[in-house]
Structure formats: structure tokens, C-alpha cells
Image (cartoon, rainbow, N blue to C red):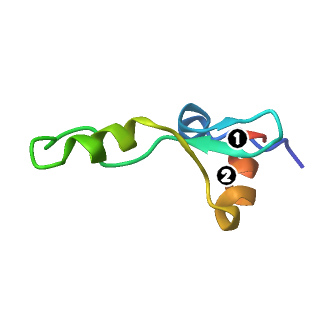
Amino acid sequence: MPKMKTNRAAAKRFKLTGKGRVKRHKAYASHILTSKSPGRKRGLRKGTLVAASDEARVKRMILS
């Protein structure tokens, strides 16, 4: 059986933390920013972690 390939789209979007959790960027921060409040836009700049229910799937895509 051949080796699994890394999903390159996922590898560009997700990074692993030191403890093995998966970091991601927040959505809705790219356009139509005039209708969003400054506080909301500031919050969208921060990264966050992938949900625990999705973590195994994302790890399988980026660690293959």
C-alpha cells in the first residue's frame, strides 16, 4: 500500500502547536470589512485552535 500524501491545501492553512494541538486562522476577515465593528475585526486577527471534534481529521491531512 502506498504512503498517504499530505493534503497541501490543509498544510498551508493549519499549523501544529508545541503540544500537538492544531492552530487555524479565523474566517470572515478578508472583505466587506466596513460593516464589521473594530472590535470584531480585531478579534478576527487572532488565531484560534481547531475544535476537538475536527482535530483528528485535520491532523491526518497534514501529517500524512
- For image coordinates 9% across by 42% down, the residue present is 34
- Disc 1, disc 2: CB below 8 Å? yes
- Residue at 39% in and 35% down: 45
Circle 2 residues within 10 Å: few <14, some 14–19, many ≥20 = some
- How far from the left and from the top, in percent, is residue 40? 29, 47
For image coordinates 53% across by 37% down, the residue present is 13
Q: Name the residue under label 2.
A: 58
Q: Position of residue 39 (x, y in %)?
A: 28, 44
Report whether 41 appears left or right of 7. left
What amino acid does circle 1 point to? Ile
- Residue at point 43% right, 46% down? 26
Farthest residue to the bottom: give it. 53
Percent of width and height locating residue 56? 75, 58
Image vertical order of residue 12 relative to residue 28, above or below:
above
Between 56 and 24, the one nearer to me in the picture: 24
Which labelled disc corresponds to residue 12?
none
Looking at the rendered structure, the secondary structure element under dot 1 is helix
Residue 19, given in percent of the width and then of the height, sits at: 83, 40
Disc 1 target residue: 62
- How crowded pointer 1 is (Cα within 10 Å; few <14, some 14-19, many 20+) is rated as many
In terms of depth relative to the viewer, which is nearer, 61 or 20? 20
- Look at the picture and state if 27 lies above or below 56: above
Looking at the rendering, in which quadrant would you find the C terminus?
top right
Q: Which residue is at the front of the view, 40 or 61?
A: 40
Q: What residue type is labelled 2?
A: Val
Name, please, the residue furthest toward the left.
34
The CA span between labels 1 and 2 is: 6 Å
